[in-house]
Image (tube, rainbow, N blue to C red):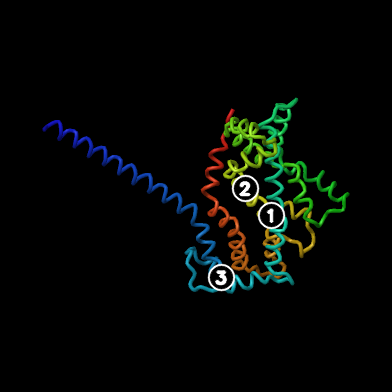
Amino acid sequence: MARTMLISQVERRRRRKFIINAVFRYTILTVVALVMIYPIIWLVGATFKTNNEIFTSINFMPSRIDFTPYINGWKTRTKFTFTTFFLNTFSFVIPKILFCLITSTLVAYGFARFNFPLKKVFFSILMATMFLPSVVTRIPLYILWKNLGLLNTYVPLVAPTLFANEPFFVFMLIQFMRSIPTYLDEAATIDGCNSFGILTMILLPALKPALISCTIFQFVWSFNDFLGPLIYVTSLGKYPVSLALKMSIDQSSGIVEWNQILAMSFLALLPALILFFCCQRYFVEGVTSSGVKG
């Protein structure tokens, strides 16, 4: 009887300790989450405020809901609306994603599944380019596209992806492929599959989480890219969203409509947020499964 009571007390003490630790952890996580997400909440609220209210109130709730900043911000002060700028952005972001996935997969397949001379040397060079700042290649690439007469087009933004210019994605896919057993390739070879058939029918279905992770990364980086379009695109009618938002901050008139700028900034965040929440299950799996594997 005494032993049973002692065990019961120990169990209650352990349960109490577990509850206290859980409450403490979730309290800390909640506070940190609120601190991190508050700027986004404030951004959403500020899109419905007037300019004066934005700078006089720290409360994220507007005094009244007014969609005028969205309407006027979408129209802009030019002959183009943000419809044009969003279409311009998607017109080069989508090809960049497609070409990046195709070329990165092919290069990763070669490194992960084939042995060829100087393989380790080429892989070392590939990894070295991952740490090369993109600003180093800006001037040579600008001179190249200028001599080819391709400035003020989206070709300079899309063409590099035809050559697997994102070593981070190649590395991620290589590690993911190395986690797939090679006996699947051997079984497919026995059944008559060639190398291309193994890639398309065996590896690609298994690469789905990693490919979705690459898609999300490439979409966010390309959609938010400012320096590339700033250098290569000069016509207002070809501006992407990133340049259009900068154009909206026009201080020549002395008045900056910050509520309109914030409204368009929030709309610019939505595509990436929607894509992430639709694919977050595959994104987490792709990132966690692409760890370093020998």
Dot 2 lies on which element?
helix
Question: Does residue 74 appear to the left or right of 13 in the view shown?
Answer: right
Q: Residue at x 76, y 46 (%)?
A: 160
Name the residue carrying label 1: 94
Foreground of the two, 56 or 75: 75
Q: Residue at x 86, y 51 (%)?
A: 146
**C-alpha gap between disc 1 and disc 2:** 13 Å
Q: What numbered label is drawn on residue 217?
A: 2
Which residue type does callout 3 highlight?
Answer: Asn
Which residue type does callout 2 highlight?
Answer: Phe
**C-alpha gap between disc 2 and disc 3:** 37 Å
Name the residue carrying label 3: 52
Foreground of the two, 28 or 124: 124
Identify the image quadrant of residue 49.
bottom right
Dot 1 lies on which element?
helix
C-beta proximity under 8 Å, tags 2 and 3:
no
Q: Residue at x 33, y 42 (%)?
A: 21
Foreground of the two, 233 or 272: 272
Label 3 or label 1, whichever lies nearer to me, is 1
Label 2 neighbourhood size at 10 Å, few (<14), some (14-19), many (20+)? some
Label 2 or label 3, whichever lies nearer to me, is 2
User: In x, y percent, where is residue 152?
Assistant: 81, 57
Identify the image quadrant of residue 290.
top right
Dot 3 lies on which element?
helix
Sequence-wise first label, 3 or 1: 3
Foreground of the two, 260 or 179: 179
Quadrant of the drawing holding the C terminus = top right
